[in-house]
Image (tube, helix red, strand yellow):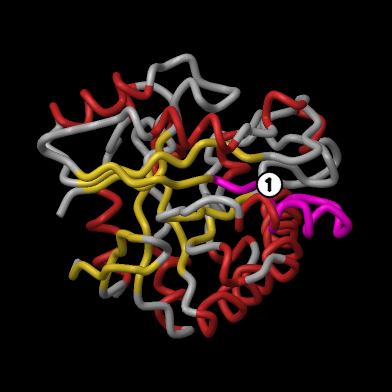
Amino acid sequence: MRCDYHLHSSISADSSTSPFLQVRRAEELGLEEICFTEHLELHFYRGEDWHLNLQDYKERFAQLTSSSIKIKFGIEAGIALAEEYFPELEDELRSMPWDFVLASAHTVNNIDPFEPAFYAGKTLPQAFREYISTILSGIKRLDPDLYCSVGHIDFPAKGVHSEMDSRLFYRYAPDEIDALFRHIIPLGKCIEVNTATYRSLGQLDPPGEDWLRRYVQLGGEFVTFGSDAHSPEYIAYRLDDAMEIARRAGVKYYATFDQMVPIFHRL
């Protein structure tokens, strides 16, 4: 099965693409299943547009149809939150019949890794360590029944910094990566392989095999795959490469979801 479990549309604050166009492009690519994961960010520095009206999203999602692919109802929930905001986030997540919830972080101490200020005075490994620690802090505060997968642990690779090679290597943050994996794996949660960072690689090989291999060593058995596409040209971007990297690392399965329950597919 070919699927993409991380898609955005104009329902999110940072995309101008109609969700209907995203569906049509997925059909053209021959995908069998997609999941919309529109942004839900509470008390976000970019403004209230990022605090998605979930009822409006549900109504707009209900208009999406396809004769050839399954379309799943998902959300990307921002977990880089102050502790006092987690009850509010959990109430929001409990209010909708999600198929899939992707937990992710888009800031560290209210600074966006897309901004040069995030990298001031630190090396790229230090940036990754701070970012992954932020994910772990948030994921520990979130009710584990309210998420399925942890998104883009290599998010800083997309930021503005001076390194020519911005890939996340396991050696950059072994303690932080191990701590994250040791937390989510016993809970039956998984990690996302996000191909958005592949877009700026040039001649470099896609990243992830080393930290995915560590994920497997620590007991991880399945992943989700997502392009993080905000426009049609990036749907399923280098999906086959991502699947091959996960396969080489020893990952056994990838998952799709129905009503928050994983459905496993052999890699």
Tell me if residue 239 can be seen.
no
Q: Position of residue 237 (x, y in %)?
A: 30, 35
> Residue 181's image quarter?
bottom right
The structure residue drawn at horizontal position 75% and vertical position 28%, both measured from the top left corner, is: 116
Residue most toward the top? 16
Viewport quadrant of the N terminus: bottom left
Tell which of 42 and 14 is nearer to you. Answer: 42
Tell which of 258 and 13 is nearer to you. Answer: 258
Q: How many marks?
A: 1
Q: Is residue 247 left or right of residue 124?
A: left
The structure residue drawn at horizontal position 54% and vertical position 45%, both measured from the top left corner, is: 76
Q: Disc 1 marks which residue?
A: 124
Q: Position of residue 93 (x, y in %)?
A: 61, 54
Is residue 2 positioned above or below 60 on the image? below
Q: Which residues are magenta?
A: 76-90
Tell me if residue 206 can be seen.
yes
Q: Is residue 92 left or right of residue 137?
A: left
Is residue 209 positioned above or below 104 on the image? below
Q: What is the crowding at mark 1: few (fewer than 14 residues within 10 Å), some, or many (at least 20)?
A: many
Q: In the image, is residue 80 part of the stretch drawn in magenta?
A: yes
